[in-house]
Structure formats: structure tokens, C-alpha cells
Amino acid sequence: MVKIITGNKGSGKTKILIDMINAASKTTNGYVVCIDKNDKLRYDIGHSVRIVETDANKIYSFEAFFGLVAGLLAGNYDIKDIFVDSILKVGGNDFEGLGAMLAKIENLTGDEVNVVLTVSADKADLPESVIKYAVN
């Protein structure tokens, strides 16, 4: 299941995401992964959460990001939750590309893995291919 949290910069998306990560780490029957540009969330989330840095792994496009997620899931069948902060910092403001990537991730994960991403953009600026995943 893929969900996105939308809102402009400073609207509290990361705080919501941190709360979701910490709740999932306490209740999951598998592993929780946090994907971020760097490790700035390290001290805000539980120690059991695996952190993957996109900068350290040279992930700079939506296609490369999809490959990262697919690789994580291929190598770790026990991942149940994936949380991503600021996905637009990976692929830029290519909203159509984001929508295509979200569809591919949804197809890959199905109902087996929960994927939640933050998108720093106003919901009105996003195409339907992205909005259909919005939770707010």
C-alpha cells in the first residue's frame, strides 16, 4: 500500500512521518526502513529502524529510487514498512515521473508492505497520478 503526505515546506509533514515511523517500529512484525536524503532523522526515530541515505547511495532519480526499493525488498523479505522523507529531493519536481514511480512501487509491494512518502508540494499542483495516493 502506497500513501503520500503532501504539503508545502514547513507544514509539518516530517513530524507526521516521524510519528508514523515510531508507531510502526513498536507494532510491526517485521522491519521498518526509513529512506532519507541524509541521516538527519537518526535521533528522532527508534533505534530498531533501518536508515538508508539516498545521497550516500547516489540515488538521484525516481528510476534509481525504484531500483533501491526493489533491491531492499528483494534482499529483505521481512520489511513491512518503508517511510520516505522528501521524495522530491531525489527526483526533482517531475510530478508525472513521481506518479509513474508510485504506481511501480504499488505494483511491487501490493498489500504486503506499507510505503509512506512525503511530497513537498501543494496538493492542487499535483497530477491525478500522484493525488490518488494522498492521505491528507
Image (cartoon, rainbow, N blue to C red):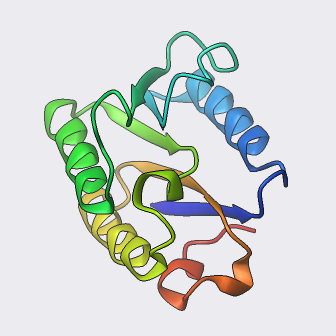
Is 47 rendered above or below residue 81? above
Residue, x 41% and y 29% (percent of image)? 53
Would residue 64 be seen by someone viewing this image from the given angle? yes
Please state the horizontal and vertical placement of residue 14, each as a whole percent of the image: 72, 42
Q: Residue furthest top?
A: 47
Q: Residue furthest bottom?
A: 128
Residue, x 76% and y 44% (percent of image)? 16
Q: Nearer the viewer, residue 68 or 75?
A: 68
Q: Quadrant of residue 97?
A: bottom left
Name the image quarter holding the N terminus: bottom left
Q: Quadrant of residue 57?
A: top left
Is 96 rendered above or below residue 22? below
Name the image quarter holding the C terminus: bottom right
Would residue 30 be seen by someone viewing this image from the given angle? no
Please state the horizontal and vertical placement of residue 90, each as a whole percent of the image: 43, 52
Please state the horizontal and vertical placement of residue 29, each as a whole percent of the image: 44, 27
- Taking 34 as reference, is 46 left or right? right
Q: Nearer the viewer, residue 74 or 129?
A: 129
- Taking 101 as reference, is 7 left or right? right
Q: Tag count in the figure?
A: 0
Residue, x 35% and y 66% (percent of image)? 106
Please state the horizontal and vertical placement of residue 96, each as a whole percent of the image: 42, 82
